Image (tube, grey):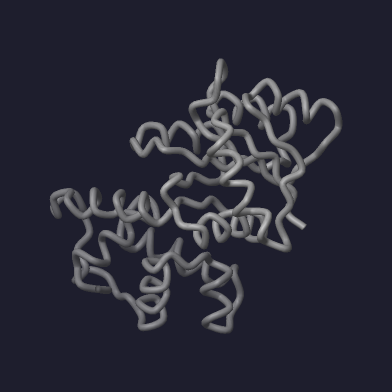
Amino acid sequence: MIKIILAEGHNVVRNGIRLLLDKEIDIEVIAEANNAKEVLEILNDGLKPDIILTAINLPNVSGIDLVTKVRLTHPDIKVVMLSMIEEEKYVIQAFKAGAIGYMLKSVNEFELVYGIRHVYLVNERYLCNELALRLLDKLLRIPENKFDVHVNDIEISKREVEILSLVSEGFTNQEIADKLFTSKRTIEGHRQGLIEKTGTRNTAALIRYAVLNSIIE
């Protein structure tokens, strides 16, 4: 059972989110909070969730500040942002503070539940599809000459192309490993090797490189 504290300053919104989550047999909202102070009081009283699902615009103390406080006192609790704010700087601030997920309130019910299960089961960061595609589009608009290594100078195997395609579709290392009948560590090795080969800095830049050089579509 995935135990959740739901922090949201607007009662109608909070009730709506709870109604969606209560439909899931493996998710339980164990407490609700109107603000960050109430969340911290709940934790201090000994109630321990797996995930805190919080807005950014909470009364008095922001959701991002709440992430920082929770990470200091309860580092094993995962914090997922569920916000109307879509500006890139807030997404970055949230992840830098220690959030493991960021979803917009415009996500559908399926993605909301998927994102919660993903961070709980896989223990990897999750960014909702709308924001991920927007950031990818931004990367694709960066001039091609930003890269120092050209595709003609490196060798990329069929397996690496296959992995790149799956990464670009949003699959995690474990999910790719399951699809290709190999280990997560092997996939991690391939991904890091591709980053080093292409001279890119991270997975997002690697995917952009692969798209611009027609390695994947």
169, above or below 99, in the image: below
Name the residue at the right extreme: 46
Res 76 quadrant in image? top right
The residue lying toward the viewer, choosing from 24 and 200, is: 24
Res 121 quadrant in image? bottom right
- Report the side of 159 relative to 143 (left or right): right
Q: Residue at x 76, y 43 (%)?
A: 30
- Report the side of 213 relative to 200 (left or right): left
Residue 162: image location, x then y, percent: 39, 79
Location of the C terminus (image quadrant): bottom left
The residue lying toward the viewer, choosing from 49 and 146, is: 49
Residue 67: image location, x then y, percent: 60, 31
Location of the N terminus (image quadrant): bottom right
Name the residue at the front extreme: 12
157, above or below 175, in the image: below
Res 24 quadrant in image? bottom right
Residue 23: image location, x then y, percent: 66, 60
Name the residue at the top extreme: 60
Residue 175: image location, x then y, percent: 55, 72
Q: Residue at x 68, y 20 (%)?
A: 37
Q: Residue at x 51, y 74 (%)?
A: 176
Q: Residue at x 81, y 26 (%)?
A: 44
